[in-house]
Amino acid sequence: MKVTALWRHPLKSHGREALTRVTLNEGQSMPYDRLWAVAHDAAKADGSEWAACQNFSRGAKSPSLMAITATLDEETETLTLRHPDQSDLTVQPDVDPDALLEWVSKLANSSRAMPARILRLDGRSFTDTPFPSISLCNRATHAAVETLTNTPLQADRWRGNIWFEGAPAWSEFDWIGREANLGTVRLKIEERITRCLATTVNTDTGVRDVDTLKALNTLGHQDFGIYARVIETGQVAVGDQLELV
């Protein structure tokens, strides 16, 4: 199997950025992936520890967020966000959180809890799991969902970290509990990813257009992709091999 894409999401649920190579560290999430998150005004999270996704603004509640793309300058920790419906924003989240909140609030669903604070969690980050996870997605499984929905789908809907090809559709669900080599990284495959309404959103427009959840439920589940832990530090690049051990 071969790695076809690497993605990180510096501000949880607010933009995605393609990478060509990354170092993954034992016991941590992908560097800068979901490092920051937008806590809403009903959140109990304060940034001192991991908190569940219900505390944050996200695409399941505010579909327009799904059309954001991101670029991060790691040296200065400067984040540039882009959206088809408003001007680009370049900001340091830790330095000027108010500017960031003003920008994302324009894209938030006003009938839901509104953006209130920018939180940061180094190392394990605000992943969707109570452990520091890396998400893996299978190109063949994505194609199978396109067949179920009878329409082309952007792979960005799934917000995966690592995409790979060369395995049969859905076969990754049989890997739970196994270890894998990813470039020079060693992973432990932990669990399937249960999906939410965010995946029904067109990532070009930020509008819900395809009922991906209904399609998945025809198979008796609502899952796409798998979560893994990094158990040995190493590097992975697009084109590297993914091998079960």
Image (cartoon, rainbow, N blue to C red):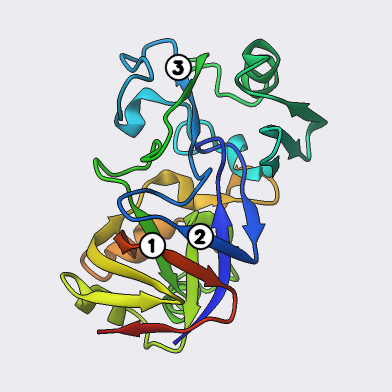
Q: Is residue 96 left or right of residue 174?
A: right
Amino acid type, label 1:
Thr
Name the spot of residue 99 as percent of width and height, x first. Answer: 71, 15
Q: Quadrant of residue 219?
A: bottom left
Mark toward the start of the polypeptide (3 vs 2): 2
Name the spot of residue 145 as percent of width and height, x first. Answer: 44, 72
Q: Quadrant of residue 5?
A: bottom right
Whether residues under marks 1 and 2 lie with C-beta atoms below 8 angstroms apart, the answer is: yes
Q: Quadrant of the N terminus?
A: bottom left
Residue 112 visible, this orientation:
no
Mark toward the start of the polypeptide (1 vs 2): 2
Q: CA distance from mark 3 to mark 1?
A: 34 Å
Work out which residue is located at the far right of the displayed protein and give it. Answer: 87
Q: CA distance from mark 1 to mark 2?
A: 7 Å
Q: Is residue 22 left or right of residue 89?
A: left
Q: Quadrant of the C terminus?
A: bottom left
Residue 23 shows which numbered tag? 2
The residue drawn where x is 78% and y is 29% is: 90
The residue drawn where x is 30% and y is 51% is: 27
The residue drawn where x is 48% and y is 27% is: 57
Q: Secondary structure at mark 2?
A: strand
Whether residues under marks 3 and 1 lie with C-beta atoms below 8 angstroms apart, the answer is: no
Residue 102 or residue 197, whichever sits in front? 102
Name the spot of residue 190 as percent of width and height, x first. Answer: 21, 62
Q: Badge 3: few (under 14), some or many (20 or more) residues near its Cα, within 10 Å?
A: many
Q: Secondary structure at mark 3?
A: strand
Q: Is residue 203 left or right of residue 220?
A: right
Residue on which disc 1 sits: 233
Residue 3 shows which numbered tag? none
Residue on which disc 3 sits: 40
